Amino acid sequence: MENNAENDVIIETKDVTRIFRMGEVEVRALGGVSLKIKRGEFVAIMGSSGSGKSTFLNQLGLLDIPTSGAVIIDSVDTSKMSEKEKGNFRLHNLGYVFQDYALLPELSAIENVYLPLMMQGKSKEECQKTASLVLIAVGLEDRLNQFPSKMSGGQQQRVSIARALAHKPRVLFADEPCANLDSVASKQILELFKKFNKEEGQTIVMVTHEDWHMEYVDRIIRLKDGVLE
């Protein structure tokens, strides 16, 4: 039974701290966070401004290096990886959705989605087919060749979700994905997350400060002053 329980855990943090130094001043953004996230969970990280939410997400997503402690993803201790190994691991195993969409303006929707797939070494034909299917899955079948400047914020966020999901990541990380959207578009984005979580078993870790988002998630992790509340 113990092995099965361990196999259910996709992310584990062990006493993760993050200290930022600004001249003589030391800011402890994370004060030793230990937790486990199960495979297929939809988790929200919540807390007031300055609580360490985004800093913690950046540790989980290997976008930043902890000052001390370890982040283990699918039994892989990432603290033992080189920067090159981490970059490769991110490319193949993790997906990211940011509040500002982070789309390349000179590329169409389908090109934005298939670019990371091409970086994995897949053929252009395979990349285009996969990108088309995932854009259709997020409801953008009529926007495949449209540029970001011609899309609403909600549509741009759907493209970024399609890009994050195209390679079927082990974990999808979302940092305030609805921050720049109105309530209607926000609801559509959260419904999409819920759909992929339930139908595909996609593990999702989302930072949010909106209480009404809680109805969409399986579990809430609350941070206060860089520690679990």
Image: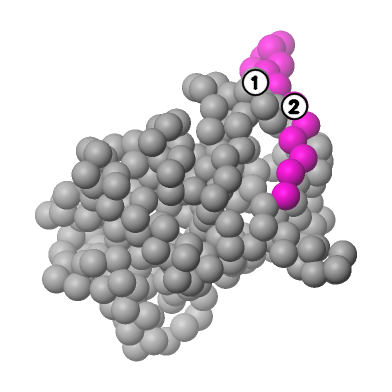
Residue underneath mark 1:
225
Q: Classify the position of the C terminus by image quarter.
A: top right
Q: Tag 1: Cα neighbours inside 10 Å, few (<14), some, or many (≥20)?
A: some
Residue occupying the point 69% across, 42% down: 65
Q: Is residue 38 left or right of residue 212?
A: right
Q: Are marks 2 and 1 in contact (CB under 8 Å)?
A: yes
x, y percent for residue 4:
80, 69
Q: Which residue is mark 2?
A: 31
Is the residue marked by circle 2 packed among few (<14), some (14-19), or many (20+) residues within 10 Å? some
Could you tell me residue 100's position as x and y percent?
Answer: 34, 42
Q: Amino acid at mark 2?
A: Gly
Sequence-wise, which precedes: disc 2 or disc 1?
2
Magenta span? 20-36
Viewer-side residue, 76 vs 199? 199
Q: Count the numbered circles shown.
A: 2
What is the image's colouring? Answer: one colour
